[in-house]
Image: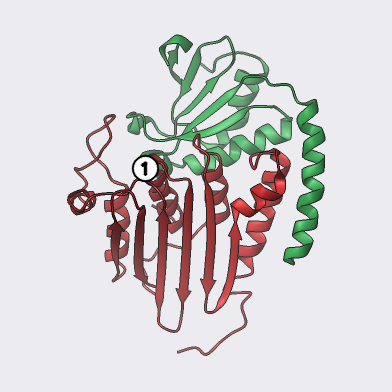
Chain colours: A red, B green
Amino acid sequence: MKELSLHILDIIQNSIEAGASKIEINIEENLETDLFQIEVSDNGKGMAAEQIARILDPFYTTRKTRHIGLGLPLFLEACRRCEGDLKIRSKPGSGTTLQAVMRHSHIDRAPLGDMPSVLITILQSAKPLDWMYHHRVNGEEFRLDSSEIRRELEDVPLTHPKVRQWLMELLVEGESSLDLKNLPQRAKA
Amino acid sequence: MTKLKSLEELKKIREEAKKDLLARVQTGTRIIIGMGTCGIAAGAREVMQAVLNELDTRKIEAHVETVGCIGMCAKEPLVDIEQAGKARVRYAKITAEKVPRLIEEHLIRGQVVQEWAVSRIETQQI
């Protein structure tokens, strides 16, 4: 995948398949410790230990439409080649948490990419769900919860073109406030 | 943007959208985009953004949704268009650049873009 945000979009499709209605996305970039961490938690149906053990195997999938499942193995490889790792915690009935860690400065680390489009895409899913998005870069943070917006909207859907445009602008603005170019220079190694 | 200011804006948009909802006619058009690993890697996210933008620009009412992989991974990004009373048409290898022509020909002129279409699914089959 060209961007880490596409891996995030991809694994959230697994959460949607698992019947999740709420997804928490935490992205933490720390330039001092040189870490890039992505954590995604859902309230889906969860997995048993034996399923977790097989989930990183590309020849394992629960789907009937094809015989391979590449989403998680691709993400795992993206982490490993950047001196990182990917871990999954889950229990049947209590959701799943995925944690991906990479070395921030690694030359092979893909950029985070277009998170606003990913967050908008998730809301277009055929199965309605909400996300809680939290992105931190060196202590600066951007946080947004789609359920809060949904509540304010009353009976207007989040996918309404006017709402979508407003949300997109809000997300783009939030993300650009974390752009390293716009952040005040802090202690640099 | 301060949180308070954006909340004020949201309330304004909500009121505008409410009026809009009353005026809208349900067209029964659905656009379904494959968002499995294969679709995402092939550019389905960009295709979906292009579809949403094109519909907004042309003020076309359609329900856009994403689905998982349907098994035709080599032909991603896949876009299905379904209109009330008509067969669902599946288009393959759609890119953001192809979207304006797809919307124009299929939704506005009512003609299937034969060179991109891969299958036709009668509604009772779904």
Helix, strand or loop at label 1? It is: loop
Query: Three-letter amino acid code at disc 1?
Result: Ala
Q: Is residue A32 visible?
A: yes
Residue nearest the observer in this picture, A116 or A54: A54
What percent of the width, then of the height, locates residue A165? 70, 46
Picture layout, residue A40 above or below residue B106: below
Picture layout, residue B47 above or below residue A138: above
What percent of the width, then of the height, locates residue B109? 66, 15
Residue nearest the observer in this picture, B95 or A144: A144
Q: Residue at x 62, y 19 (%)?
A: B28
Picture layout, residue A38 above or below residue B44: below
Q: Is residue A114 visible?
A: no
> Is A169 left or right of A61, judged from the image as shown?
right
> Is A120 left or right of B19, judged from the image as shown?
left
What percent of the width, then of the height, locates residue B45? 50, 43
Q: Quadrant of the C terminus of chain A?
A: bottom left
> Is B34 left or right of B61, judged from the image as shown?
left
Alpha-carbon neighbours of circle 1 within 10 Å: few (<14), some, or many (≥20)?
Answer: some
* Residue A99, quarter of picture: bottom left
Q: Residue at x 53, y 57 (%)?
A: A132
The residue pinned by badge 1 equals A18
Most extreme residue toward the front, as rendered? A93
How many numbered discs sit on the rendered protein? 1
Picture layout, residue A49 above or below residue A159: below
Q: Residue at x 79, y 28 (%)?
A: B22
Residue nearest the observer in this picture, B75 or A22: A22
* Residue A45, quarter of picture: top left
Q: Residue at x 41, y 44 (%)?
A: A13
What percent of the width, then of the height, locates residue A109? 38, 66
Chain for mark 1? A
